[in-house]
Image (cartoon, coloured by chain):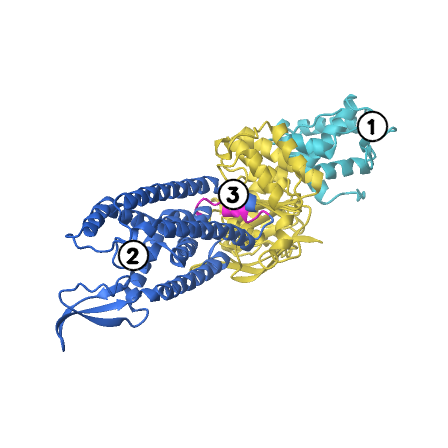
């Protein structure tokens, strides 16, 4: 199967607010997907829709080829979901949580779970609520990895962890991805970390998908142009994601592959973080797979 | 065995850093023909980077003829790999020295030199003068 | 899933078991006390309340000893279903959602329907078994007390037979439904208590009129014992053709089980509706 998640015109309304609307994306398998957006942009809703915890108000979503709401018995054993607060049954000892996993999941790998706990030095007899933040996150990760899923859905998995715990978590996660060819969708605020772990990016702004594409492609398809002060017409151009002017200079972040740009513009590569920030600051900007390589303003003679 | 590190400040992308470190290690003799490169899993578990990045780096190195992957065993440095300076490198080096001398005579300082050079490298990457298929 | 349910609620189960055991022990103890007192006082088949007779005096002495206790026990037993609904059923869904653990347990490979079915099934089983055992124990326990009460079996209507079992099932279903709609533990508990009390009081008020009551005129002064064991609805003093009489409006003793069946039916029907509400909430409201 080619795509792990396919959303068509997906929308979810809570009361009178649309948390997500008109979302269409096809996430290819084998990727580590960064889901980025400000608070309230719809990241958690998207992940919950994918896990079947919420039903769509509009549109469709298919996970690994099935509907998570209509066919949960086909989807649930193949995915692992960890919510932002990493909830566990606090009164259960770690070994009892593993037992829970074993009883409720058909593909449970008890050896993997045990060896992970041992390797990480997490005591099996301790109640979950007495674990440190880092250990809780590792237990939550173990609970989903031992299911032997095809895909992980992680809502801000390293939020609130100290730098060491964060690094260890990501090391473990990447190792599991390498071992099992896992697909992962993880939401986060920290762009710099996502750059090394993720190879696909989805930017959510005000409930809609602004950007969806491979990170390498995105970086290759955006440039910063610096040139003499330009007129207002550049601001309206759909390929201009961000602009700023000083008295004599204009700086643009543009969706372009760099070809056909007038010589008065200096062309620079852009880092992922700047691209993300530019789109976040402009919720109406879009760059969906195979963006139209529209003529950039600098291309006009 | 080579140990990879990542420098997040250089602005060089991750996979390129890995490629460069392998080349560098070969030149210095830290890596010898027949040596095994760390497995994708090992690199990823240490650096917390995407496995595809490592795969890409190893593929590039394979295309350059520096390493070869043996399915089921790992990635190894090729036996006939050329270590040390490449052929023609001495000539390139002296050409560069002459260019720098001319630039200095024209009044450029080190920062100007670097800016000019980097601009040229960038333009060449985007509009390669001689199209050599990778 | 049954293991998970057990492990999750083991403390509550232990507490409930202890309470039931205590009640059972108390009932046994009191039964022994009452039986031996009855024997000592030579009550036999003495029914006459008349303070003048030896029988009447013995009965009064007996009543002084045990009346208060029997009332306390009746009230305590009446409260049990409410405790079940408020402390066990209401938090069941509400706490999972409030603490966010529903995103954990419902993304294990078990569907939320199956989770709910097994959890509630086990809980319902435990409830019905305990309630039945308790009702049976109470039936046995109140035998020596029947002598004290003019309306006999009707006194213990709410704590014997199928009725208390229906109360317990209703309380369970109510707690689940309220918890599934309110989704916050403490408000759900409070709302469950309120609705439970209101419903019980409402049905209790309606109870005398389940079937059209019978009437009988009793000439004053009332010393007729023909209505022993009946449930008196009201006894106004009226002027009838036969002079001033007590007009007893009552439900006769032989209607006891019919009334039990009716009330059981009402509460089980309500319970069914409430389970339906929970199921709907589970599917559509909770996210």
Say which colour chain C has: blue
- Location of mark 1 (residue): B86
Q: Mark 3 lies on which chain?
A: C
Q: What element carries label 2?
A: helix
Chain shown in cyan: B
- Category of crowding for the residue at label 3, using alpha-carbon neighbours closer than 10 angstroms: few (below 14), some (14–19), many (at least 20): some
User: Which quadrant does the N terminus of chain A fall into?
Assistant: bottom right
Residue lying at the far top in this picture: please name it. Answer: B29
User: Which quadrant does the C terminus of chain A fall into?
Assistant: bottom right
Comparing marks 1 and 2, which lies closer to the viewer? 2
Question: Quick check: is C101 in the magenta stretch?
Answer: yes
- Location of mark 2 (residue): C155
User: First in sequence: mark 3 or mark 2?
Assistant: 3
- Location of mark 3 (residue): C6
Whether residue A84 is visible here, answered yes or no, is no
Comparing marks 3 and 2, which lies closer to the viewer? 2
Q: Which chain carries label 1?
A: B
Residue C222 lies in quadrant: bottom left
Residue B47 rendering spot, x and y as whole percentages:
65, 31
Residue A144 rendering spot, x and y as whole percentages:
61, 42
> Over which residues does the magenta segment extend?
C98-108
User: Could you tell me which residue is drawn at 55 percent across and 56 percent down?
Assistant: A237
Looking at the image, residue A30 sits to the left or right of residue C141; the answer is right
């Amino acid at each position: 199967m080619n795509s792990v998640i396919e959303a068509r015109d997906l929308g979810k309304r809570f009361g009178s607010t649309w948390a997500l609307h008109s979302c269409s994306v096809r996430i290819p398998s084998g990727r580590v997907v960064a889901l980025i957006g400000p608070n309230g942009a719809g990241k958690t809703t998207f992940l919950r829709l994918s896990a079947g915890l919420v039903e769509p108000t509009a549109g469709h979503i298919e996970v690994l080829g099935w509907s998570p709401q209509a066919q949960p018995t086909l989807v649930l054993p193949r995915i692992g979901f960890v919510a932002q607060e990493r909830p566990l049954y606090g009164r259960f000892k770690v070994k009892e949580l593993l037992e829970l996993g074993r009883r409720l999941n058909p593909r449970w790998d008890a050896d993997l779970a045990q060896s992970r706990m041992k390797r990480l030095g997490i005591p099996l007899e301790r109640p979950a609520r007495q674990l440190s933040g880092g250990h809780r996150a590792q237990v939550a990760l173990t609970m989903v990895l031992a299911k032997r899923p095809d895909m992980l859905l992680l809502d801000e998995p390293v939020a609130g962890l100290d730098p060491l715990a964060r690094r260890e978590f990501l090391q473990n996660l990447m190792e599991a991805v390498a071992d099992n060819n896992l697909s992962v969708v993880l939401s986060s605020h920290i762009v710099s970390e996502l750059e090394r772990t993720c190879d696909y990016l989805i930017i959510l702004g005000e409930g809609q998908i602004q950007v969806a594409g491979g990170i390498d492609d995105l970086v290759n398809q955006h440039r910063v142009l610096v040139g003499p002060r330009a007129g207002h017409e550049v601001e309206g151009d759909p390929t201009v994601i961000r602009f700023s002017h000083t008295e004599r200079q204009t700086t643009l972040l543009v969706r372009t592959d760099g070809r056909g740009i007038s010589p008065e513009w200096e062309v620079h590569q852009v880092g992922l973080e700047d691209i993300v920030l530019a789109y976040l600051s402009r919720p109406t900007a879009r760059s969906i797979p195979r963006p139209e390589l529209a003529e950039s303003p600098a291309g006009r003679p | 065995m080579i140990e990879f590190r990542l420098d997040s400040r250089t602005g060089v992308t991750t996979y390129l850093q890995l490629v460069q470190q392998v080349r560098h290690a070969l030149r210095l003799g830290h890596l010898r023909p027949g040596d095994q490169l760390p497995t994708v899993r090992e690199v990823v578990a240490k650096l917390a980077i995407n496995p595809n990045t490592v795969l890409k780096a190893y593929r590039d190195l394979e295309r350059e003829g520096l390493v070869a992957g043996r399915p089921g065993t790992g990635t190894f440095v090729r036996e006939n790999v050329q270590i040390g300076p490449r052929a023609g490198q001495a000539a390139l080096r002296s050409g560069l020295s002459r260019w720098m001398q001319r630039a200095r005579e024209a009044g450029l300082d080190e920062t100007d030199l670097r800016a000019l050079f980097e601009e040229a490298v960038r333009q060449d990457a985007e509009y390669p003068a001689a199209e050599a298929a990778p | 899933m049954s293991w998970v349910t057990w492990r999750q609620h083991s403390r509550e189960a232990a507490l409930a078991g202890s309470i039931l055991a205590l009640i059972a022990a108390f009932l046994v103890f009191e039964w022994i006390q009452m039986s031996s007192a009855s024997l000592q006082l030579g009550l036999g088949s003495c029914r006459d309340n008349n303070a003048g007779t030896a029988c009447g005096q013995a009965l009064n002495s007996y009543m002084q000893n045990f009346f208060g206790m029997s009332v306390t026990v009746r009230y305590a037993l009446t409260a049990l279903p409410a405790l079940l609904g408020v402390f066990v059923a209401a938090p069941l869904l509400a706490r999972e959602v409030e603490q966010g653990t529903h995103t954990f347990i419902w993304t294990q490979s078990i569907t939320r329907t199956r989770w709910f079915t097994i959890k509630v099934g086990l809980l319902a089983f435990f409830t019905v078994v305990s309630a039945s055992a308790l009702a049976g124990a109470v039936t046995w326990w109140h035998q020596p007390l029947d002598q004290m009460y003019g309306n006999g079996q009707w006194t213990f209507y709410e704590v014997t037979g199928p009725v208390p079992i229906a109360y317990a099932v209703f309380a369970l279903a109510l707690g689940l439904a309220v918890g599934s709609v309110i989704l916050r533990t403490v408000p759900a508990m409070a709302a469950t208590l309120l609705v439970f009390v209101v419903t019980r009081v409402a049905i209790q008020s309606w109870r005398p009129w389940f079937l059209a009551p019978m009437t009988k005129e009793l000439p004053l002064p009332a010393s007729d014992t023909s209505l022993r064991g009946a449930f008196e609805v009201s006894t106004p003093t009226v002027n009838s053709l036969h002079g001033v009489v007590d007009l007893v409006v009552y439900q006769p003793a032989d209607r006891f089980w019919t009334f039990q069946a009716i009330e059981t039916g009402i509460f089980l029907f309500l319970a069914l509706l409430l389970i339906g509400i929970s199921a709907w909430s589970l599917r559509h409201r909770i996210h």
